[in-house]
Image (tube, rainbow, N blue to C red):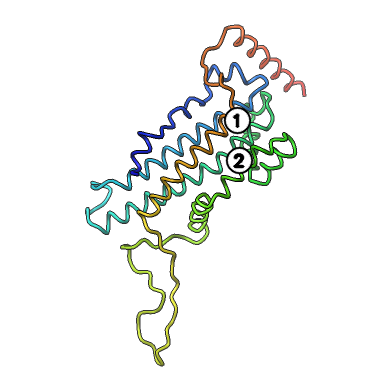
Amino acid sequence: MKAEDLLKSYGIHHWAKYKPDIPQYMKFAKDQANLILAGHKIQDIDVQFSNARASLIYLEVDDYGQLITENDSLHQTFVRSKFLFDALALYNYCIDLSWQVVYLYHGDAHFGVIQDDKYYLQATKDCDMTSLQGRLVKVNKRDGLFKHIDDFFNEPLTEEVREAYNYIKHRGTYYIEGLGLNESVLPIGLPGDVEMKMLKRRTMDLEEWKEKLIKFDLSFIKYFEAIIKALMPEDFTDNSVGLNTVLETAISFEDWGNQKKDK
């Protein structure tokens, strides 16, 4: 499969509909603000997932124009490796962000969670696999949802994608065939025919990893669609809102603000 086929056959444009706007704030900010936070994070994933796909598509370009000084094998390999590393990182961001969607949904739901920037930033900072499990299983009894997340995280392909990303994050980078040398021993003779080892990087094959990331793309869609279905009400993307709802929310927000002042 070519990366461009992902756009044609596996569209994710509907994720963008979860972006909270005026109707969602009017309908849910009062006592379901957690839905607004979750919708906001779904939009984050939509953006980063689309960026990851774009990087995969750029891998398949034949002429990079002004992006490279010469359109030869060396420069093409360099720019393609850049796009592969970009896609690898972006797909991994989506894994972390998917946890935040679930974590924020199962958190507080009052006005304050969207009015206090510190709350939102701290909540996203606190979210990791351990805290997510605590919030889902111990607090909300959503062990089935946590199992869905944990199963995806422990799938061989997910583990491989995660491990490659962490290797770059903590070890530096991979060697790409065609970009310099990656010798394991010093290429000169030493007395007594002794070989001196050289530091060597792992090798990453661009075409092989492009195929892996295409498969991961499809796997993530299936995983994340299930999360959206489990959390978000069908009417969240409905942008119709009545005047009474607007007035009720405005009054409730004013009351909430006055209570904050009195404290």
Q: Name the residue under label 2.
A: 148
77 to 223, vertically: above or below: below
Tell me if mark 2 has few (under 14), some (14-19) or many (20+) residues whose alpha carbon lies within 10 angstroms of its own.
some
Q: Name the residue: 49% across, 52% down.
A: 161
Q: Tell whether 190 sits left or right of 23.
A: left
Q: Is residue 1 left or right of residue 163?
A: left
- The residue that appears at 30% across and 56% down in the rendered structure is 77
Measuring from the top left, give residue 11's x and y in whole percent: 41, 32
- Residue 190 in percent (x, y) is at 39, 88
Helix, strand or loop at label 2? It is: helix
Residue occupying the far bottom of the picture:
192
Residue sitting at 59 percent across and 23 percent down? 233
Earlier sequence position, callout 1 versus callout 2 = 2
Q: In which quarter of the image is the C terminus?
A: top right
Residue nearer the viewer, 12 or 85: 12
Give the percent coordinates (x, y) of residue 26. 59, 16
The disc at residue 131 is none
Provide the secondary structure element on which disc 1 rests: helix
Dot 1: few (<14), some (14–19), or many (≥20) neighbours within 10 Å? Answer: few
The residue that label 1 is drawn on is 230
Amino acid at circle 1: Ala
Residue at the farthest right position = 263
Q: Which residue is drawn at 40% across and 41% down?
A: 53
Q: Disc 1 vs disc 2: Cβ atoms closer than 8 Å?
A: yes
The answer to which of 260 and 22 lies nearer the viewer is 22
The image position of residue 18, as x and y in percent, is 51, 26
Q: Is residue 10 left or right of residue 115?
A: left
For the N terminus, the quadrant is: top left
- In the picture, measured across the screen, residue 47 lies left or right of residue 106, that is left
Q: Name the amino acid type tagged 2.
A: His
